[in-house]
């Protein structure tokens, strides 16, 4: 009997830029997991630093694709969502979760909508409240600091204390009934990592790697995709976070020398061996 899992990832395709589906598909596949995709939009490039990019909204295709899958009796062992283009898409995704994700399937939501204290371009101020509905359907959330603040309707600031972070992580877990992997946590100049909250036993843990002093597009997608791959390969929450942190660190490290030419993304391909080695 074939034991290979089949998962679904729902996010946009930025044709150039090494983010969203062009990252998620190869990363999750490298872990030996059959990866199906549902594009929310097609862009010529990602929106960070490129000008005049094209955008094709695929909202109207989403229910058609869902209906075809239902007719073909196609089901998924898990689902992972990234960038979602509109509030209407959230309702379609919730329907897809109910109809074609198995009852015991694992759902991971990256509430990809903001960073550095601001919503991404194109999102209205009411989008976080709608995103919360999707988060409440998940098993695990992978927000960054800005996204957690928006979901909690808290004011964002550049630095939070450990106590403040833990209070907010617990509040978000209570609000969504999920486990939380908060990214972008740092308490020192040379470390960056995650705060992990376990829904089941209500414990908090941290995992850090060396902080690389450069910023690259797509690192959040690399983290979330490799984390989801680890979860679908039956790693524990801590093990999957460790894998994702190390994978992202290796991808960043491989890009440092090429950062001026390769400013738009990271050389994640050079870190795929970490996914190949998951048992």
Image (cartoon, rainbow, N blue to C red):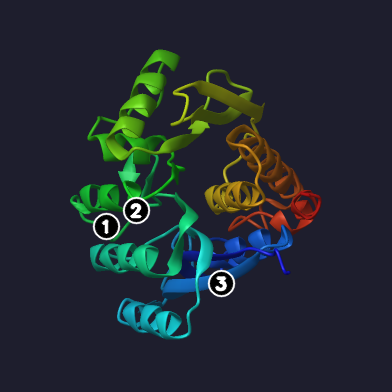
Q: CA distance from mark 1 to mark 3?
A: 26 Å
258, 98: nearer the viewer: 98
Judged by depth in the image, the label closer to the viewer, 1 or 3, is 3
State if disc 3 and disc 2 touch (CB < 8 Å): no
235, 167: nearer the viewer: 235
On the rendered image, what quadrant is the N terminus found in? bottom right
| Mark 1 crowd level (few <14, some 14–19, many ≥20, 10 Å Cα) | some
* Residue at 40% from the left image edge and 52% from the top image edge: 112
263, 121: nearer the viewer: 121
Specify the quadrant of the image occupied by residue 149.
top left
State if disc 3 and disc 1 touch (CB < 8 Å): no
Residue identifier under label 3: 36
Q: CA distance from mark 2 to mark 3?
A: 26 Å
| Mark 3 crowd level (few <14, some 14–19, many ≥20, 10 Å Cα) | some
Q: In the rendering, at what x and y percent does residue 214 appear?
A: 61, 40
Q: In the rendering, at what x and y percent does residue 165 appear?
A: 40, 22
Q: Circle 3 — which element?
A: strand
* Residue at 27% from the left image edge and 57% from the top image edge: 123
Q: Earlier in the sequence, mark 1 or mark 3?
A: 3
Residue identifier under label 2: 120
Q: CA distance from mark 2 to mark 1?
A: 6 Å
Q: Circle 2 — which element?
A: loop
State if disc 1 and disc 2 touch (CB < 8 Å): yes
Q: Earlier in the sequence, mark 2 or mark 3?
A: 3
Q: Give the numbered dot on residue 123.
A: 1
């Amino acid at each position: 009997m074939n034991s290979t899992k089949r998962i679904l990832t729902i996010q946009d395709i930025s044709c150039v830029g090494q983010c969203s589906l062009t990252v998620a598909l190869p990363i999750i596949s490298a872990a030996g997991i059959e990866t199906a995709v549902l594009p929310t939009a097609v862009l010529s490039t990602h929106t960070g630093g490129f000008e005049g990019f094209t955008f094709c909204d695929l909202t109207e295709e989403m229910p058609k694709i869902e209906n075809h899958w239902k007719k073909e009796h196609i089901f998924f062992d898990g689902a992972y969502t990234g960038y979602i283009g509109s509030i209407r898409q959230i309702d379609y995704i919730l329907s897809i979760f109910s109809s074609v994700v198995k009852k015991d399937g694992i759902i991971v939501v990256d509430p990809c909508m903001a960073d550095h204290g601001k919503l991404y371009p194109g999102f209205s101020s009411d989008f976080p409240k709608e995103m919360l509905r999707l988060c409440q359907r998940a098993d695990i959330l992978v927000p960054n600091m800005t996204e957690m603040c928006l979901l909690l309707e808290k004011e964002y600031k550049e630095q939070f204390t450990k106590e403040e972070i833990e209070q907010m992580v617990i509040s978000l877990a209570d609000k969504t009934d999920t486990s939380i992997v908060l990214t972008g946590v740092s308490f020192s100049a040379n470390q960056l990592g995650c705060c992990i909250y376990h829904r089941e036993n209500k414990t908090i843990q941290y995992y850090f790697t060396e902080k690389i002093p450069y910023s690259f597009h797509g690192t959040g997608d690399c983290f979330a995709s490799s984390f989801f791959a680890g979860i679908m390969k039956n790693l524990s929450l801590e093990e999957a976070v460790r894998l994702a942190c190390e994978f992202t660190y290796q991808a960043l490290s491989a890009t440092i020398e090429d950062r001026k030419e390769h400013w738009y993304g990271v050389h994640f391909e050079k870190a795929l061996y970490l996914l190949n080695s998951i048992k």
